[in-house]
Image (tube, rainbow, N blue to C red):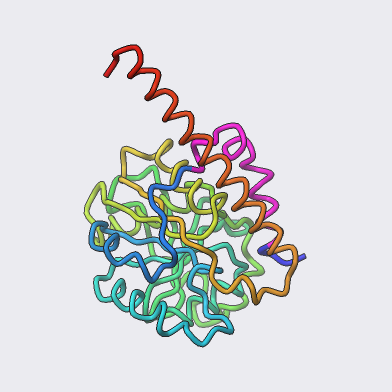
Amino acid sequence: MSYVTDVGWKTVRDYKREMFARGSNCQADCRRVSVGDIGDLVNKHDIVVADREFTFEKGEEKSWEERFQPILEFIAKQAKGEMLSISSFGDFLESGEAYKDFLPANKLVTFKGYAGMYLLRYTVGGLNILSYDPTKPVLERFEDETNRFLDGCIPPESLGAFIDEQYEKPDPRVLKAVIDHAVDTGKAPEHPKVLMVGDMYAADVILANLYKQQFGDEADVHSCLVKSYGLLHEKRPTILITRIIDRSLGNLFSFCTDTKKHIRSWDRELMGMP
C-alpha cells in the first residue's frame, strides 16, 4: 500500500471525530471547478496554500499548461504561494524541484534524536531545514539549521532515513507552521488572510476548519474546494476509493449542515427572532 494511501486511511482514523461527529467541519468557504479559477480569491488573500496531488499535479493530460500554469505564474508573481501536500519525503523532494519556480513546498517533521519540530522547505535554492518552536515570539520561531543536517556530507535524498514523524493534513499544526513562517519572514502581515485550496474534505477543508478552531486568532483562514484533477488516469484503486468516500461523505455532511442552518433560520423567522 502506498504512502499516500496509508496517510489517507490514517487521516480518516485519527480525525473521524472531527469529520463524522462534527459535520460542520466539512463546510468549505467556497468552491471552484479547478485551481485555474481562483484568480479572484488570490487577490483577496495574503497567502495561498495549495494542495498538489490531484489538485494541480502534472499528469497525462496535455492541457496542464493551459489550465494551471497561468494561475501558478500569477501566484508566484505576487509571492503568495505555498505548497502543502500529503506525500512521502521522496515525493516531497520531487514535487519541490518540479514546482520550485512557482511556489515552495513545505513539510513538517521531527528527526530521530532531535527535540522539537522542523519545517522542511524546498525553494529555488534547494532544501532548507528550519527548526520550529511555535511557543516563541514572532520573528523568533524559526532557525535555519540546514548546514547542521546536511553540511555537504549528506545528500538531501538521504535525509528521509533520519525522519521520525511526518505531520500530515488535517493536523492544523502543518498549516500553522507555513503561516508562521510567512509572517516571520515578512512574506505576509501579522494576522494574514489565508486561502487553503485542495480537492479533499478530510485533508484540506477540515484542515482549514480545525485551524480556525485552534488558532483562529492568529490568521483568517478560508477553504476552497476544487474538483480532483487527473483522477481518471489514476491506476491505484485505493486512491480512487479514498477520494470517492471523501467526496461522498463530505458532500453529505456539508449538505446536512446547510440544511440545519436553513431550518434554524426558518425557526427564528417563525418566532419573530432576528
Quarter of the view holding residue 166: bottom right
Identify the image quadrant of the C terminus: top left
Q: Residue lying farthest front?
A: 270
Residue 10, x across and y down, in percent: 68, 50
Say if the magenta span includes residue 177: no
Of residues 269 and 214, which is closer to you in this image?
Answer: 269
For the image, the number of numbered tags is: 0
Q: Residue at x 63, y 49 (%)?
A: 11
User: 133 left or right of 237?
Assistant: left
Q: Residue at x 23, y 62 (%)?
A: 43
| Closest to the observer, 130 or 240 | 240
Q: Answer with left or right where residue 255 lies relative to residue 67.
A: right
Above or below, 91 relative to 262: below
Is 43 situated left or right of 122 in this image?
A: left
Hey, which residue is sitting farthest top in the picture?
271
Q: Residue at x 59, y 53 (%)?
A: 247
Image position of 54 with respect to 249: above or below: below
Task: Residue 201: give x, y in percent of width and height.
Answer: 54, 51
Vertical comparison of 163 with 115: above or below: below
Q: Give the camera-side residue of 44 and 77.
A: 44
Expressed as whole percent of the image width and height from the top left, the position of residue 255 reads: 52, 40
Q: Is residue 38 left or right of residue 112?
A: left
Instruction: Tell me where the magenta segment starts and ends, as one range.
Output: 5-26
Residue 109 at what x, y percent from top left? 55, 58
Q: Which residue, as the protein is rendered here, is positioned at the far bottom?
A: 62
Q: Main secondary structure of the magenta part?
A: helix
Say whether residue 24 is magenta: yes
What residue sits 62% from the left and 70% below the top?
160
What quarter of the picture does the N terminus occupy? bottom right
Dividing the picture into quadrants, the one containing residue 59 is bottom right
